[in-house]
Amino acid sequence: MTDTAWRAQHVIFEQAAAALLRCPAPVVAAVEGFAFGGGCELGLLADFIVASESAVFAFPEVTRGIFPGIGGTQLLPRVVGGPLAKELIFTGRRVEAAEAKAIGLVNHVVSRGQARARALEIAATIAENGPVAVRQAKKAIAYGTETDLDTAMVLAIEAYNATVVTEDRREVHGALGTPPMTTMPLTLTDEQRSLKAGVAEIAKRYPGEYWRELDRERAYPEAFVAELTRAGYLAALIPPEYGGAGLGIYEAGLILETINACGANAGACHAQMYIMGTLLRHGSEAQKRAYLPKIAGGELRLQAFGVTEPNSGSDTTKLQTTAVRTGDRYVVNGQKIFISRVLQSDLMLLLARTTPVDRVKRKTDGLSVFLVDIRGIKGLEVRPLRMMMNHSTNALFFDNMEVPAEGLLGEEGRGFAYILDGMNAERILVASDSLGDGRWFVEKAVAYSNQRVVFGRPIGANQGVQFPIAKAHMAVGAAELMRNRAAALFDQGQACGPEANMAKYLAAEAAWEAANACMDCHGGYGYAEEYDVERKFREARLYKTAPISQNLVLAYVGEHVLGLPRSY
Ligand SMILES: Cc1cc2nc3c(=O)[nH]c(=O)nc-3n(C[C@H](O)[C@H](O)[C@H](O)COP(=O)(O)OP(=O)(O)OC[C@H]3O[C@@H](n4cnc5c(N)ncnc54)[C@H](O)[C@@H]3O)c2cc1C
């Protein structure tokens, strides 16, 4: 290359470096493999670096007769200190990931292949915060560290004052719990209407007799689930590149709500929708390619989610099932309780402890998530439990069950965070189950109260019968608004923990209120199997307890939304 061409090309690099350095939004660098020379400088120009254990950093320019040309000589000393920067730049010595972490060059070192995923995870957390606040903080740090402390303090206070007048600040610190602005659907689109109509058409082909028979036998609704799968409804949330419909959580919720509103039971198949999210967000590309298309096509079923244990219950971090790495596999020992649909699944998502609790900093560390192919697996005993309702629920016993190391999702030890990450989807979908139940009870109660004549008039003419149904209808409608709000936030990629939890709570309570109004107005007939009311009554009750009990939602809202002391 001629000197002129060299300089012309370098101008482009300089402009790119300046743009990156002064980018107002945070920039997180993810490094896999070599980051030499310009690559290393790009990392330094970002706000911080997430590296995989395969990452190697170096400034080998001096060995080629030049030196780091887009700021390496200025940036590296600011990060690792002058003397070490000089050594690295003068010698061109290679720095491996562990040393890079030790000298502060990178913030995190993760397993091979996971740097991008971890960087995106951190970026997603940052994106949940006030955008103006984050940018101003970045500006204050960037300019403040380049000047004397007095000037830096002035800069920081000015940047801070700029956040006071923003909507972000008012949303968080305004009236308690005032939710952020978002657009929420008030009516269904034509596509959403036809989605519901399609689901209802299938659900109505499986009438009360079908469910009653299964309920008696405690049998799984194979035909119903197979038909929903064939029609693609259970793959609603799987992105199109993996063979799914790529719909939003709102649409997924409408599917479940419609199933239950038709008198069917979405509990037989709802879990696949939210379990799959953990694989989608934290699985490697190879895992996603291996499983998601088959799940979408119905070739594989992922309906089992093994978290609850007899000795820990709602206190998940105390779970005692262990997975110990031995060569190329993990050996699992322990016990789970109330794990549903294991006998109807090919795959199970399993949460187990990989590092003993006394060897981790926080009790939430050291838990890992595995995607286990349970077809014919040795060391797993499944004992079906006869429950109040037909839910295919089991006790599981692991006796040296071997899981190939490729079954680990994401990084070892970060499983609790991955599970938490999927909670909002789970809450919104379970709220949708309850909304469907609530609608079914209200419709059934209205129909019966209009036609049952006692004392010479329809029982619905009595306020004692009519008002509880009207109240339940209002409760279902209000819960639906909260579900819609949570779903809208979720689908816009915004934080929705409070809304998702409140939706689950309110919908479960509303369904239960409707269930009782429906039972009451049916008198003795409510207890007769052929009316389906007692079956739905038993089914709807579950969502006050699982997948999380109402008390734990109240504890979440008390602590995380209202700022009250932790109560558990
Ligand atoms: C039919 C069915 C299917 C299920 N399917 C699955 C499944 O597929 N996978 C899975 O992992 N789990 C499953 N579960 C388990 C379910 O998620 C748990 O039952 C639920 O989370 C509650 O845990 P627990 O039963 O151990 O109750 P516990 O934790 O023992 O709690 C008992 C009661 O005490 C209350 N309580 C406990 N601590 C506090 C506190 N600090 N403050 C206030 N109240 C408190 C709870 O709210 C609850 O009412 C299922 C359960 C049922 C019934």
Image (tube, rainbow, N blue to C red):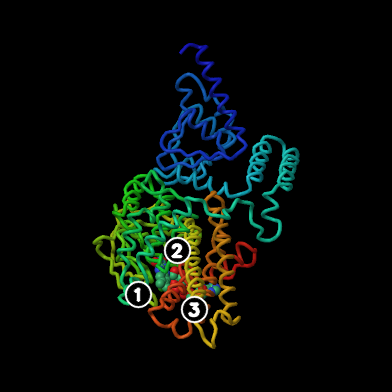
Depth check: 317 or 230 in front? 230
Count of marks, rendered view: 3
Q: Is residue 412 left or right of residue 181?
A: left
Rendered residue at 66%/46% (across/down)? 133
* In the image, farthest residue toward the front: 456
The image position of residue 557, as x and y in percent, is 59, 65
Task: Kindly identify which residue carries mark 2.
Answer: 357
Please, what secondary structure does the residue beneath circle 2 have? helix
The reply to whether the C-beta atoms of the residues labelled 2 and 3 are less than 8 Å apart is: no
Q: Is residue 87 above or below residue 295?
A: above
Please, what secondary structure does the residue beneath circle 1 have? helix
Rendered residue at 33%/71% (across/down)? 210
The image position of residue 386, as x and y in percent, is 34, 77
Mark 3 Cβ inside 8 Å of ligand 1 = no
Task: Kindly identify which residue carries mark 1.
Answer: 212
Please, what secondary structure does the residue beneath circle 3 have? helix
